[in-house]
Amino acid sequence: MNERKALGDYGETLAAKEYRRGGYRILDRGYRSRFGEIDLIAENREYVVFAEVKLRRNDRFSTAAEAVDAGKRQRIRRTAAIWLSGRDSDKQPRFDVVEIYTERSRKAGAPEIHIIENAF
């Protein structure tokens, strides 16, 4: 496994733990379609959440969420539509961005995690 993939998996694992702490159930990780990939799919009583996870060292030059441009958002929406078409759910879809910063920490060594709900 290359370093980029390993870092991506690490970020997705941290994000999944954060969603679980918030009462969500993880439905899928790394879901792929011909349009793109959704890092994390989770649900609670109200929502099916499609989350894009962005891990960065810091936000010195830009925030992690700023890396989710219009093209990326469109690919995620299309992929989410395919995922939803294969399931029977009456829950509202929601698109989140999870920012993870490794240099800033709440406690020693712990990355800082921000879930931006309804990011797009």
Image: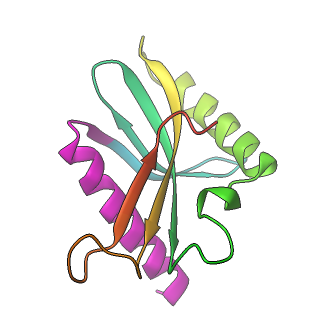
Whether residue 53 sits left or right of residue 110 in the image: it is right
Q: In x, y percent, where is residue 44? A: 29, 27
Q: Residue at x 50, y 88 (%)?
A: 3
Q: Of residues 16 and 37, which is closer to you in this image?
A: 16
Q: Residue at x 44, y 34 (%)?
A: 49
Please say whether residue 54 is visible from this viewpoint. yes
Q: Residue at x 68, y 76 (%)?
A: 61
Q: Of residues 44 and 84, which is closer to you in this image?
A: 44
Q: Tell me which segment is drawn in magenta.
A: 1-26
Q: Is residue 10 above or below residue 103?
A: above
Please say whether residue 2 is visible from this viewpoint. no
Q: Residue at x 25, y 83 (%)?
A: 109
Q: Of residues 48 and 99, which is closer to you in this image?
A: 99
Q: In x, y percent, where is residue 85? A: 56, 23
Q: Main secondary structure of the magenta part?
A: helix
Q: Quadrant of residue 76?
A: top right
Q: Quadrant of residue 10?
A: bottom left
Whether residue 34 sits left or right of residue 50 in the image: it is right
